[in-house]
Amino acid sequence: MIRDEIEVPKELREFMLECAEETQLGQKNGAKRQFRYGNLHIREYDDKFLVHTDRVDPRKDPIGHLVYDAPEILIGLTCSIISGSEIAKKFLNKSNKSTKSILLSSIVAGYVGYVATKKIKKYLE
């Protein structure tokens, strides 16, 4: 899915929908604040607003939002759960299988899955 963002410079017009709610849901990408109004996702920066429409509102259907709008997060979590535990099983001997090592393996695997999916998603857009 190609998601076009519209840039609205603040000097052109300082705007904000009265009904838009400030939210923590979504990747801030360096924004000061972000807002949602239905499927509309608005990020506020010092000099501009970036606005795009998500296919699914994460406040109403978080799983649907992950599947259609943010698959990199879902894939990162899946990699973390599956690959992390497999890495820990295969490469750590039984005496060295500490919770810390398994957690670290899971975090690394999840991050690799997240970054790879984000790059693929950007390439496809």
Image (spheres, rainbow, N blue to C red):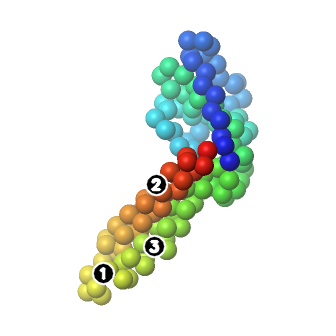
Residue 24 horizontal side relative to residue 95, left or right:
right
Calculate the distance from the C-alpha at mark 3 to the C-alpha at mark 2: 15 Å
Find residue 124 and report its horizontal and vertical position in percent: 60, 49
From this viewpoint, which residue is outermost toward the front? 123
**Which residue lies at the image location 59% right of the left edge and 39% below the top edge?**
23
Q: Is residue 83 shown above or below 107?
A: below
Instruction: Please report whichever mark, 1 or 3, sits nearer to the chain's N-terminal start.
Output: 3
Q: Looking at the image, is 118 positioned above or below residue 47?
A: below
Q: Distance between the residues labelled 1 and 3?
A: 13 Å
**Helix, strand or loop at disc 2?**
helix
The three-letter amino acid code for the residue at tag 1 is Leu
Disc with the residue nearer the chain's start (3 vs 2): 3
Mark 1 to mark 2 CA distance (whole Å): 25 Å
In the rendered image, residue 74, in percent from the top left (x then y), is placed at 57, 60
108 versus 68 height, above or below: below
Query: Disc number at residue 115?
Result: 2
What secondary structure is found at the residue carrying circle 1? loop
Q: In which quarter of the image is the C terminus?
A: top right
Amino acid of disc 3: Ser
- Mark 3, residue position: 83
Q: Nearer the viewer, residue 68 or 43?
A: 68
Q: Position of residue 58 (x, y in %)?
A: 66, 49
Which mark is on residue 92?
A: 1
Q: Which amino acid does label 2 sit on?
A: Val
